[in-house]
Amino acid sequence: MIKSYRLEIGNRCNPRSLQRIAFAVNCISELSGVDLSKTYTIAFVSIRDIAIALRVALLSKGKEELGKVYNWEVINLIRLWGKVLSAYPKESGLRPLIYPYAQVTSGLMRLVPSPRNYGLRFHCARYLIDLMGSSGVYIPVASALLEALNCREVLKGKGGAAENARKQKKNGRGEKGNEKRIVKPLDWRCILRVSDNSLKSKHFREGVVNQCLLLLTKFLSTLSRSVALPEVAYPTLAGLRRFGKTVSTPAYSKQARQLVRIAEENCQLVLSLRARLDFGAKGVADYSCIESPLKFTKDKTPLEEFCEKLVQQEIEEAKAFDSGLTEVDELPEQESDSDVEEEDKKMEAAADRPLLLKAGSSGADENGDEEDVVEDRVYIAITIPSALGSVPPTATFVFGS
């Protein structure tokens, strides 16, 4: 079943296949609860294979190795196991897999920090936040979202398409040269990478800001009842304040300030309730990072209300997008430039090869092109308590340098 999902359902994603992927994920998640020990074995092997492929991609500089992890097959496997671990968060059979899953997903999210790959980053962050909310395990996601929020394409404001239009007009190309540069709205539900043309558009900047603020709201909403919210949220709020001061677009600054205001209101509520407790920090040791001994008088915290509002807006936008969907709109990657299309073909060809790689395989690019490759090495150590008879009690994966 997992093989059929990986090869036939999860190997692609577009607006028309989203419901089929979601249905398959829900079905497999429910069936996984029948035998948790067998589910652990299958999930362990799958996460291990992704970790090995990610290690090879970290050590190499080739697009072929990146294509083995930057594809829908891997992302939909991350989606599947995130759903399974979220469905059975308290079960002792699957709970040891939360740490390695979070490590692999975090490493995949930061593998190539190029703005073109922010779609993949948003998918991984969404799955980690969902797992964090259901398991009660704190997973640091905010820093990756703040990094995307402060990219040059967002901060520079009136750049990109408007600047290119002025250059084309100055060079005598006029409106004809600009007609080919029209970019349609981006559907982030089915995007891993965007084209260079989309990267310079207003739709990209708006999408990045909306996705980052939505995911940051979900992240803070998950912790909104925690006794440690004021301390945990401080770095995130400081980053949002800095973004609100440096961004040149007033609308983006207003959105960031609104989130900061609501988060500060929630922090003040937690501080007032925390002052009434009759025990200190040692008394909170029995609670997880999300569980709280605080007694809230209202059903929802300010952050939970604001998060629910943003989620409802996202659902309405998705319905509006689907209602106007045409055959041309099916794959957002079709907007790529010629060089991006050639690169996508290479990555798709690499994705068809087996996922399990040898640690010593070479990753040099035949053209010597090092675009979208991180020069800094990342070190990630993964320790997976194993329930397999043929595997030692503790299996350790170390990749990077």
Image (spheres, grey):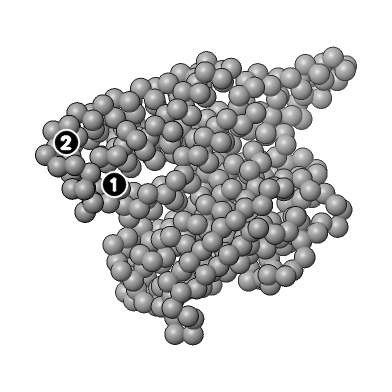
Judge from the rendering whether residue 147 lies leftward or rightward of residue 365; answer left or right. Answer: left
11 vs 142, nearest the viewer: 142
Q: Quadrant of residue 93?
A: bottom left
The residue drawn where x is 30% and y is 48% is 289
Whole-percent x and y of residue 381? 54, 61
Query: Relative to 45, is 137 above or below?
Result: above
Circle 1: element type: loop
Quadrant in which residue 50 is drawn:
bottom right
The residue drawn where x is 58% and y is 17% is 248
Callout 2 secondary element: loop
Whichever of callouts 1 and 2 sits on the residue coming sooner in the sequence is 1
Does 300 sit left or right of 181 as displayed?
A: left
Residue 281 disc label = none
- Can you tell which quarter of the image residue 314 is in? top left
Question: From where the camera sits, is residue 342 visible?
Answer: yes
Q: Position of residue 374 (x, y in %)?
A: 69, 47
Crowding at dot 1, Cα within 10 Å, few <14 / some 14-19 / many 20+, comes out as many
Label 1 belongs to which residue? 290
**How many labels sit on residues?**
2
Q: Residue furthest left?
A: 278
Residue designated by label 2: 296
Q: Relative to 139, say whether 204 is above or below.
A: above
Q: Viewed as shown, does residue 277 lie left or right of 359?
A: left
Which kind of residue does numbered mark 2 sit on? Answer: Phe
Residue 209 placed where, x, y %? 52, 30
* Residue at image coords 74%, 29%: 181
